[in-house]
Structures are given as C-alpha cells and as structure tokens.
Image: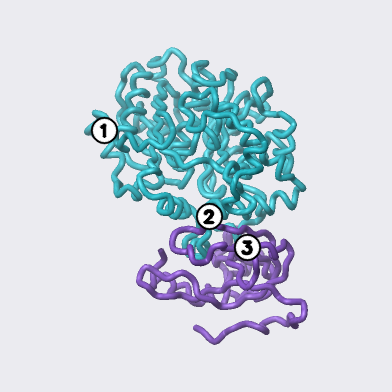
Amino acid sequence: MRDVFIVGVGLTEVGKRVDIALRDLAAEAMVKAMEDAGNEKPEAIVVGNMLSSLVEQENLAALIADHAGLRGVSGFKAEGACGSGGAALLAGYSLISSGLFNKVLVVGIEKLHERPTPDTARGLAYAADADYELIYGISFAGLNALVMRYYMNKHGVTREEMAHWAVMMHENAYHNPYAQLRKKITLETVMNSPVIADPVRLFDSCPLSDGAAAIMLVSEKYRKLNDTPVRVAGIGNALDSPDLSSRFELDRFIAAKLSTERALKMANASINDIDVAEIHDAYSIVAAISVEEIGFAARGKAPKLWAEGRFRLGDRPVLNPSGGLKARGHPVGATGVYQVAEVAMQLRGDFPGLKVGGEVGLAQNIGGVGSNVTTIILRR
Amino acid sequence: MTTIQRIWRLRNRLIRLSGTRCQDCGLVTYPPKAACPKCGSRNLIEIELPREGEVLTYTVLNVPIKGFEQYAPLIIAIIKLGDAKVLAQLTDVKPEEVRVGMKVQATIRRTAPTLDGVVPYVVKFKPIKSSEVSAEGEGIETTVV
C-alpha cells in the first residue's frame, strides 16, 4: 500500500445555511481545499453525504464536480449515515493507496435545513433499523436515550457529570470561526434545557446543521503541494448492527473499538501517542462511549474524568478543540471530513480556533448509534 | 412511512416475536438474522421468544418521528425476553410509572398507518400487574391477526 497525505483542507461555516445552495456550499469547500493544495485539481472526488434525497438531489458527485469546475473527473458518493464522511475518506484513501489515483478530493456535504424539521428528523432515523425500530416511531434522539439511561444506571454516572461535556464543547467552539454555536453556556443551561427524549436533554444533543468540508488526499509524489503535508498514518472502519436489540452489550460500541484498533495498528501507534482528537459527540452519551472505546478512559469513567476537568486545553489528549458535534455542529455526512480537516490543521498549526498543536492526532466518526465507525490517525 | 408490503412480510415476526437461535453457538437474536452475529454460522432456526420479560432501559419521546404524533408521549423500551432483547413500545402505562426492571407482557395493538392508509398491528408491551398470574402466554390479546 502507498502512503497517503493531506495537502489541502477547506471548511465552510456550519449553521442554518439557507443562504446558500448545496452545490455552492460544496464548491466553497472544494475550492478552498484545492487552493490550499497549490491550486491543484484532483483526478477523482468522493462525496460523503447521508440525506441529499431529502432535497431531491442524488448523483451528488456529478453535480458538485461539475459545479466546481471538475467536469470529467472520476467520482461517486459514499454513505454510512452520520459516518458518511469517514466512509468517503476510507474510499478516498483506498483509491490512492491502491495506486489507482494520485490526487483525490474528499468532500463532505449536508443540508438539513432545506425541509421542515419533522421531515429531517424522520430522515435521520433512517440510520436505525427500519423494519424493527422505526416501525415504533422512535427518533434518533430516542435511540441514544435508551443507551444513555442504560449506561448511567449501570455505571452510576450522574446527570450532572454527563452535562459537563456540553459546557466544555461550547467553551471550545467559542473560539472556532466555523462553529455553529459560538456561545458559552453553564451547567444550569444544560440541566434546565428541555427534555427531548428522556433522559436526553436539548443540550445533550448536537444541533441540526448545514455545512461542507473538503480534503485533498495525494500520494507521496504530490506531498510537496503543501509546505506542511500531514500523513494519514492509519485508517480503520468497522460495522455493528444498526438495531440496538441484538447488540451484545447496550453500553458499548464494538465498532468504535475495532476501528480504533485497526487504525492504531496500521499507524504503528499506541493510544498514548495521541495529542489531540476530534470525537463524535452527537449526544453526550455517544461522546462517553466513544472516549471509552478509543481507550482515553476506562469503561463507565469518561463522564467522571471530563467533569473533573480532563481533556481540556493543557491536558493530553485534548478532545474536540473545534467544539465537537455539540457546538461546531453536525452537518451529518460532512462531519467526518470536518473532524479530519480540523485535526490536520491542529498538527499543521493553523487551526483558526483553540490551538493544541502536537505530532499525532485522531478523528473518530460514528454513523448510526455506533454502527458504522471510521477512525483515522494523522501524523505530522 | 412504512408500506403495506413491509408490514405483510413482517406480520409473523412482529406479532409472534420471532428470533433466531444459532444451532452452533446457541446465541439467540432479535431481530432474526440470516447468519449468527457472534460465530457467523448460517445454521439458525427461527424461534418464538417468551412474551413476558423486564424493562432494561426506556425513553419517553414528546416528539416521536413524523407519522407517530398521535402516540406522544411515546414510551419506547428495550425489554429482556429470555435470552433476547426486543425494542418495542410500552402501552397502558404512564411515563412516570415506568421503571427499569419493570415486568411487562406482550399485547397486540395498532400502530401508525402505512403510506397506503392501512392500519397495521404490532406487538407492544404492557405492565404485568402484581395481581395477575404471570404464567407464560396468558393474558395476551390474540383476537386480531
């Protein structure tokens, strides 16, 4: 397998972007990434997206390649629910490491504010098992709530310990110009926010987001397109059941553990090498289990650690300096691309928010309730 | 919205609560699978799960997904039924009365209409009152198919 490098990143502001069309939002990220890579054009694009059918638009690769001046390149869309961005990066990485292409632009794009919220909420629940779960009317927040109650009961975790995560994420996002929720909050904000699916409260949950991000991946031959190329040292993906009923354990995401092990093994790295990580905190419970499966905390202990002040700037590792899904926002199919771009910028030293620096970074992108997980290790 | 053909395909599983048991490693799974999630064996048999069990975890949705608004507040639980777990709606109980560990039994009820306007029936779970005999299979409403 050939080495793969990141030589360009492009981010757009996450939020309720009714001001801009899907194709223009995608093109903005793509052009930024190409300009960051010495204005080089890719030979292929891979698009990460979950729900463009909600805006009656499929065939996304053709649409956005053409719109961004790339008519004639190769390309396709990759889908893995909220893990679509990670799936697109896995495909893009494979296209280069296999030798088929030398330059691939991976683009994550999602527009959730084009339809009334009930339509979007139903669409997000398509990540669950349609035959056996959706048939009862459960929302995606509801599925996470089932796991959250089980986890808190089993491990004796308090409501307040869980709530510290959101406060930390809002503090981090305050400094990130691309973040959707750039305002600091208190523990009371979280504890007094409306219950959306008991015990999940509004501030345990990420917002609905539009956004696009792009990353130029290249082979060794083109690494000099950027003064500070970042190597994709390891990448791992794993799947679990989309249904919760048949999970071996309700408080675990085995796909998160397996994908981490695969990525670390490929990178010849250990968990202790990680300086900075962007993890997938669609809900505070997802953050807790992700942190534990990666190995940053023992099982059932992540909320206690973050309530004690761990994982903030000055600690190691620093988690989600971007503000995470909770406050940077969660433009579903774009999120995995944002995470990897943000970690790459941390290692390059040019992330425009909280600066962590470091040599080795990790990003974990989770689709469904832990059912499609991609973990990526970057090395400066 | 679901469709009439989906409900028709699932009619036995959603009413009889069919799972699969692996003939090699013994794992019982719901929903039924084409191969064992633990050992990969395709040597599975379809079994009927017990109709009484206990709540492992639950949630209360004030905003169910589109099409299920009439059921708000919607209570969904994961219920331990013998060696399997089943995600399903709880009925005949107020949100504040639900507890982890609560004993429940299967009952057959209507759910939200399909895209074609058909009203399907599915298994939901209701509390077993302490006065009721909890012999397996008793107390189940089976008049509707």
**Looking at the image, is mark 1 or mark 2 nearer the viewer?**
2
Identified at 55% across, 51% down, the residue is A141
Query: What residue would you read off at disc 2?
Result: A242
Residue pictured at 54% horizontal, 63% vertical:
B72
Looking at the image, residue A84 lies above or below residue A245: above
Q: What amino acid type should be assigned to the residue bearing mark 3?
A: Ala
Above or below, A140 relative to A353: below
Q: Which of A206 and A220 is in front in this view?
A: A206
Three-letter amino acid code at the position of disc 1: Val
Residue labelled with disc 3: B77
What residue is disc 1 on? A73
Look at chain A in the picture and name its colour.
cyan
Q: Label 2 lies in what chain?
A: A
Secondary structure beneath label 1: loop
Helix, strand or loop at mark 3? strand
Q: Quadrant of residue B67?
A: bottom left
Q: Which residue lies furthest to the bottom in this view?
A: B143
For badge 2, the amino acid type reads Pro
Chain containing mark 3: B
Chain B: its colour in the image is purple
Q: Quadrant of residue A109?
A: top left
The CA span between labels 1 and 2 is 34 Å
Could you say where residue A264 lies in the image, as x and y percent from the top left? 60, 33
Quick check: A363 left or right of A156? left
Packing grade of label 3 (10 A; few <14, some 14-19, many >=20) is many
User: Badge 1: few (under 14), some or many (20 or more) residues near its Cα, within 10 Å?
Assistant: some
Q: Which of marks 1 and 3 is in front?
A: 3
Crowdedness near tag 2: few (<14), some (14–19) or many (≥20) residues, C-alpha within 10 Å = many
- Residue B110, percent from left and from top: 50, 75
